[in-house]
Amino acid sequence: MRNVMIFGATSAIAEATARRFAERGDNLYLFARNRERLAVIADDLKIRGAHSTAFDVWDAGDRKDCESMVTRAFADMEQVDIVLIAHGTLPDQKACERDVETALREININALSTIELLTLIANRMERQKQGTIAVITSVAGDRGRQSNYVYGAAKKMVSTFLQGLRNRLFKSGVNVLDIKPGFVDTPMTAAFKKGLLWAKPERVAGDIVRAIEGGKAEIYTPFFWRWIMLIIRNVPETVFKRLSL
Amino acid sequence: MKLSGWGQYPSVDAEVAMPLADRDVTALIRSPELGRTMIARGLGRSYGDSSLAESVIGMGAMDHFVSFDETTGQLRCRAGASLDQILRVFVPKGWFLPVTPGTKFVTVGGAIASDVHGKNHHVDGTFTDHVSLIRIATVSEGIVDCSRSVHPALFHATCGGMGLTGVILEAVVTLKAIKSSMIEERTIKAANIDEAVAIFDDNGDATYSVAWIDCVSTGKDLGRSLIMLGEHAESGGLAVHHEGRVSVPVNMPAFLLNRYSVWAFNTLYYHRVSQPLTTRTVHYDPFFYPLDGIHQWNRIYGSKGFTQYQFVLPKDNGLEGMKVILERIAGSGRGSFLSVLKVFGKENGNDLSFPMGGYTLALDFKIDAGLFAFLDELDDILAAYGGRIYLTKDARMSRECFRRGYPRVDRFIETRVRYGADKIFNSLQSQRLGL
C-alpha cells in the first residue's frame, strides 16, 4: 500500500493510472479543477480497491492557495510515496500565434504551474528521503514544430527542470521520472483522426506504473516514440524548417 | 472522422463528441446540429450501422462505478463502464456478470441498448433482465430514472432499443455470486443438427450451453456440432483474465477467406474433439470470450468488411427451418469460420429485444457482390418460419423483414415519439429500418 498524490486527476491518463494504483489498494489524494468530477472519480477508485481516497479542488491557472494546499496534503498523508503530475491543456497553436495573452496563459498552465508544484513538492520529498516524482510531459517537447511549438516549449521547460531536479534529489533517494507520451486517445484529443500511432490511456498507464516501479528516469510511451523522436531530433534544421510538421 | 461498426461495413463520416458528465450529454441533446443524425456509441462492437450517425456521442469517458452493495451484488455504474472492467474489479471479490455476450469489450449502456444475451439465456434471460434501473437523458423529459415500475414504457423501449430512446447514462445491474473464476466445461459431439438439438434439450438445466456448428457439411452431417456446456466451478481461485497480447495489425487480403479455407477450418474444428464427451476445467476467459484474445480479429475478413447474420426461429417448426437455411448456406459455398447455435429460453417483454423461445444461429459472411441478395433469400425463408434478425448484428435487412420480425415495433415508436427521441436520435440503421 502506497500513498499517492495525483495532480490533474481528472485527465484521462491520470485516471487510468489511478485505477492501477487503486487496484493494488493504495491511498489516493486527488487534485483537479472540477469538484463534481473529482467526487465521481474518488467513488469509483474506492470501489476499484483504493484503501482511501481524498481530493481537493485545485486550478493550475490560479496561483493562490497552492502552497497551503500542498502543505495540508503532505500533513494528511504523512509520508508520500508517489506524486504524479498530469494536468495540462492542448493549446490552439493558431490562437497562441494571434494573441500574446493566450500564449502566455498556455505556458503558465503547461509549464509554470508544474514548476510551482515541483518546487513545493521537491523540498518536502527531499526531507522525506524517499519516493518518486513522476511528471507527464510530451514527445512534443523533443523538438519544436510549427503545429504546436507553444505546447512543445512548455513541455520542454518542464523536462529540463526535471533533469536538474533528478540530479539534485538523487542523493536524497528520490526518483524523478519524466513521462513522454505520444498520441493518446483521450477526450482532449477526441476531435483528432486516429491511426496506428495512437495509444489508449490504459496502455500509457501501464507503462507509467512500470516505470515508477522500475525507478526509470525517462520513458516514452508507447515505447516506439523513443525511436520516432530519435529520428525527428536528428533531422538537420536546414531540412526540418522546410517540413510541414 | 471515419467510423464503422465491428464488421467494418458500412462506414460514416462522423463527428464524435466525448461527454465527461451528464450535463455535457444534455447540452449535446439540446443543441443538435441542424439536420444531423445523432446516436450514442459505446465500444463500437455492434457489427453493422447501429452506432453510426453524423454526430456520435462517445460514452467511453463516462465509465465510472458509482456504488456497490457487497451483500446483494447490486452495482450502480455509468453507461460507459465496460464488462471487461466489471470483471477486472469484481471477479476477485467473488462476483460475475449475470449475463455476458461473446465479448467483454462492450459497455453497460451498449449491453442494455442491444439487450445482449449469453450462453445462459435459457435459464437467466437477457442482460436487462438483471437491470433494475436505468438513468437516461431524454429529449422531452430531461434526465429520467426508469424501471419496471417508473416510466415502464420507457424502460421496456430502452432495453433493446438500440439507443433510440435517449442516451443511457447510468444503470443498476445485479451481479452474480461465484466461488471460482473457473468453469467446468463439458463438450459433447453431435453428428448432425437433430442430435445437437436433442443434446440441448437433454441439458436444459445446464447453466451455460452453446454449440459451434459446422456450416459447410451437408446430408447426414448437416449441422454437426460441438455442444459446450458449462457450470461455475466450486473452487480454483478468483483469478481475473489477462489482457490479450495478440492483435491482427492490418486487414488481411479477403481472398484468404474462401470456400476451401472455410471448409478446412470447419472440418478441423469439428474433429479437434475425438471423444463423444470430454470435460475440462477452464478459466472464464477462454470459455466465454474465445476471440477476445485476438484484438481486431474483424480484420481477417479484409478491408471490405463482413456482416454477421444472426437470426432466431421460434421453437415450433424452427428445427425444420434451421435445416432449410443450413442447406442453403452449405450449398452457397459461402460460410463462416465459426458459426454458433443456441437454444433460447422465453422472450421478455421489451419492445425490440431479440431473443425468443427457439433456435438461434449466428454466422459471419465476408461482404462481396452477391452477399446481400443471398441474405435476402435467407430472410424470405426466415419470414416463412416466423423468425427475426438481431439488430445488433444487422447492416442490411429491409424494412419489411424488420417489421415482420418485431411485432411490438409500433409500441416502440410510440414511446420514442412520447419522449421526443424520434427528432434527435437516429442511426443509419434506424433510418434504414424506418424507426
Image (cartoon, rainbow, N blue to C red):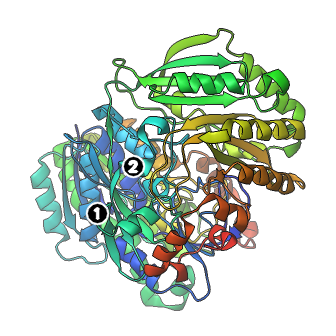
Under mark 1, the amino acid is: Ser
Q: On what subunit does the disc labeled 2 rest?
A: B
Identify the residue at horizontal 63%, vertical 27% (top origin). B197
State how far apart marks 1 and 2 are (Cα): 14 Å
Q: Which residue is mark 1?
A: B149
Where does the N terminus of chain B fall, quadrant-wise? bottom right
> Dot 2: few (<14), some (14–19), or many (≥20) neighbours within 10 Å?
some
Q: Amino acid at mark 2?
A: Asp
Above or below — where is A43 with respect to B284? below
Point out the residue furthest to the front here. B316
Quarter holding the C terminus of chain B is: bottom right
Front position in the image: B207 or B278 = B207
Q: Quadrant of residue A97?
A: bottom right
Q: Which mark is residue B129?
A: 2
Vertical comparison of A149 with A78: above or below? below
Q: Residue at x 62, y 70 (%)?
A: B430
Position of residue B260 measured from the top left corner of the image (x, y, whole percent): 89, 31
**Residue A163 place in picture, x, y as percent:** 41, 53
Q: Please name whichever residue, B321 or B1, is drawn nearer the observer in this view of the structure.
A: B321
- Say the numbered circle drawn on residue B40: none
